[in-house]
Image: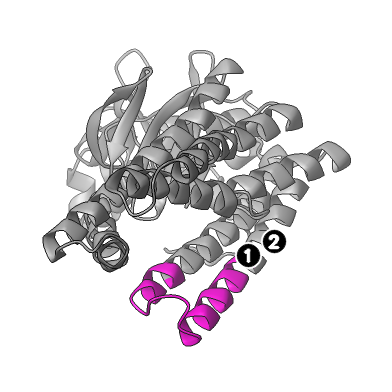
Amino acid sequence: MEQTRRAPRRPDRRPGLTVGRVFGVPLYLNGSMVLLALVITVLYAEFARQQLALSQLGGYLVGFGFVVSLLGSVLLHELGHALTARRYGIGVRGITLELLGGYTEMERDAPSPRVDLLVSLAGPAVSAVLGAVAVAATLALPDGTLVNQLAFQLAVSNVIVAVFNILPGLPLDGGRALRAAVWSVTHDRHRGTEVAGWVGRAVAVGTAGLVTLLTLTRQVAPLALPLMLLVAFTLWRGAGQSVRVARVSRRFPLIDLSRLARPVCTVPTGTPLAEAQRRGAAGGEPGAALLVTDSAGRPFALVDPAAAEAVPVERRPWLAVDAVSRSLDNLPAVPVGLDGDQVMETVQRHPAAQYVVTAREDVVGILHIADLAQLLEPHRKMNT
């Protein structure tokens, strides 16, 4: 299954083993590809032995060749997405090949329905062209030969990738195209995502039902059933995630840092923890964060509430707040005037539990990621 996603991740994390760059796009290989190679090699080896009268070893070699051709097809498919996205000014973080195909990770969403549609269809278009060429080669080459079988492998790989991904449900490319169409008609990207997500769930259920039926009627090898059911489950999960993202994104305009950020209470460096907590409580603002200031009155640290609560009550009058504080240099800063989309961009680029909310040089509040999550998903049960 190939898909194009905008998936924020930490800068120090990688989705798999880095294997190089293709046209300047980083290429990663997920460890799950080993499982894919084994399963498909075994399944295809028997078919190849029957068609070409090969030995068992020869069948496995042809089966492995099918895996290689499938991976190459997926890579070219994803390059179609990546290069089209770059053509329209959308940065590409990388391409990852994994168990069920691959995905292209982009830095931002498409700016318009038209661009979204073009980027979505670029991958299936590449697969369709390659499939058509390979089908023509298969028909032109003598039957029962290895060259004919290799061409057949390329044809099957690309036709499967093109046809399956054009199905109109997220997270598939056809789902992105459907989203672009609904977005264009309704002028509401979130509605388009929700519609395509629900259709994606229907596609997942249909896929599971179809492969089960084909297995029961012996038209598909039983060994393929677990893999295809995994594909259906992944589709269902991806579709559900798309619906959730649409609902969350619709609430971005509600993000107002001046109201969402917790207030601050400043205390000088060296202040006993008990006295700092008393001042915070006397300020009349529940949940106020304690900021530690230097001798010039400049804030430089934030008291960690968890660390402060872990200190026994009898020790708090004798322990300075500095001992349970974190340097502000270790916390990302967000200007108070950012709108909802800009706040989420900052959170995605700099994942953290807390953010310093600033107004020019002043610290005006502390944003807790849990408060932001509660605002965006008010009905979701949060871990405390």
Q: From the viewer's perspective, is 351 left or right of 17?
A: right
For the residue pair 300 and 3, the one nearer the viewer reads as 3
Q: Is residue 293 visible?
A: no
Residue 264, position as x, y percentages in the image = 48, 35
Q: Is residue 198 above or below residue 246?
A: below
Q: Is residue 344 above or below residue 277?
A: above
Determine the main secondary structure of the stretch shown in magenta: helix
Residue that label 2 marks: 199
Quarter residue 28 falls in: top left
Residue that label 1 marks: 203
Q: From the viewer's perspective, is 88 left or right of 146?
A: right
Contact between labelled residues 2 and 1, with CB atoms less than 8 Å apart? yes
Amino acid carrying mark 1 in the image? Val
User: In the drawing, what numbered circle is on residue 336?
Assistant: none
Q: Residue furthest bottom?
A: 216
Amino acid carrying mark 2 in the image? Val
Which residue corresponds to the image point at 26% horizontal and 42% vertical from the top-left? 16
Which residue corresponds to the image point at 50% horizontal and 80% vertical from the top-left? 212
The boundaries of the magenta stretch are: 203-229
Query: SS class of the residue under badge 1?
Result: helix
For the residue pair 82 and 280, the one nearer the viewer reads as 82
Q: Is residue 374 visible?
A: yes
Which residue corresponds to the image point at 39% horizontal and 36% vertical from the top-left? 75
Residue 225 located within the stretch drawn in magenta: yes
